[in-house]
Image: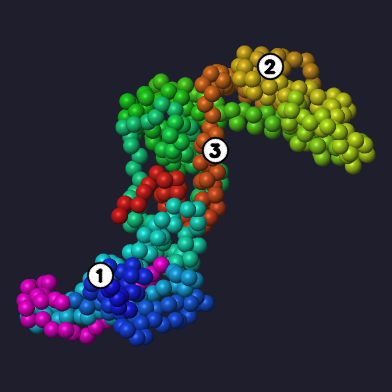
Amino acid sequence: MISLSLSNLIKSILNIQDDNISFPEEEFCQITKKDNNLIKVFKGFLNSNYYTCPHCNSKNIVKNASRHRKIKYIPFQNYNLELELTVQRYICKDCKKTFSPSTNIVSDNSNISNNLKYTVALELQNNISLSSIAKRYNISIASVQRIMDSCYPNFKVNKEHLPETICIDEFKSVKNIDGAMSFVFANYQSKNIIDIVEDRRLHSLTEYFSRFSLEARSHVKYICMDMYTPYISLVKSIFPNAKIVVDKFHIVNLVIRAFNQTRISIMNSIQDESLKRKLKLFWKLLLKYYPDLCQVNYYCQSFRRKLSRKDKVDYLLEKCPELEVNFNIYQDIIQAIRHNNFKRFEDIVKKYLSSKEKISKKMMIALKTLKKYMKYIENMFESNITNGLIEGLNNKIKSIKRTAFGYSNFSNFKKRVLIQAGIISISA
Ligand SMILES: [Zn+2]
């Protein structure tokens, strides 16, 4: 049986594979305290058996003074860990230059060990702020940023290829300019982000996409988006074969908002306080798909009797005929979408646009918007493509932004998003 020396045991625990590093048999570790952090400092030696001067190859070398290097390690059992290496220095008597040995556990000009760098680099793939990472590993935010720069390559989008189906969306930019929006687009099939563009305005996007080859742009068959007119101009000028698909979520949302605003304005105009309160209290039931409403009776404080959710909705509609008209539009549209029936969807919009019923201003605007985008809504029914995927990616981006106080710089922010999305991987 081979018995492990204490020095080798420490090296084994700290995962050090460098024959030139050794630890003393006594007083190899000290505990110190800094800013409320307990630090275990392991004291070791970095020796080397130089035979010749690395500068001039002379054999005329002697040991010079030694220096101390403090190297940060991966924290262990609630202690921060540091290595204090005494490094032997040498001097060449011929060329007068001094030199000292290097080690594979840390770069020559760094105080952060390579394994800590790698741990921090992996941590950057999770949704944790730079400052939390810095705190957790007892290093500065600037160091975390430097690790991000050095361990991950800069991202370059492939301008020679685009997928068949693209989802596009926007999010509020990191800069504090009012209304500044950034643009993100993703591959519908692979569910991966393709790229992020700082400025979503038309001239910026046109310039951006012009740099893709015509072959790449021609390959795109569908582009799924919300109802934002500049995007339509973009597609028409940049993607010769692409069909525009309006996202289902945005259509449903448009109608929900119009109906909800209608409910609020009706609510504010009526005198009956009890009815007013009920319109406020049961707003969620009104938004539910009517055939899905529960018909089981429960006691309700507001009505002072037992009744079902369906009864509550029926009551409100009966008391507010003006609400009912708009409710029916909302329900009809939801139903057409649920049944994936474009013909019916188109008929409903046409019917209500020319109807004499008391349709609210907000609902009228929504119907006109739907009419304006009808061709692209038809593509939605036909292709069944939605932006659900990119909404998910976008939520991720938003949560990265929330933890990203450090990103005044867009390219750093973008890099972090792409790291977390798995688009950029550790390079070294
Ligand atoms: Zn020399």
- Give SS at disc 2: helix
Residue 111 found in image quarter = bottom left
* In the image, farthest residue toward the right: 304
For the point 43% across and 77% down, which residue is it? 40
Q: Which tag, 3 or 1, sits closer to the chain's start?
A: 1
Q: Quadrant of the C terminus?
A: bottom left
Q: Which residues are magenta?
A: 49-74
Amino acid at circle 1: Asp
Q: Which tag, 2 or 3, sits closer to the chain's start?
A: 2
Side (left or right) of 39 relative to 359: left
Seen in the picture, residue 291 relative to 144 is either above or below; the reply is above
Give the foreground label among 3 and 1.
Answer: 1
Image disc number at residue 391: 3
Amino acid at circle 2: Ile
Amino acid at circle 3: Glu
Residue 76 found in image quarter = bottom left
Side (left or right) of 104 relative to 371: left
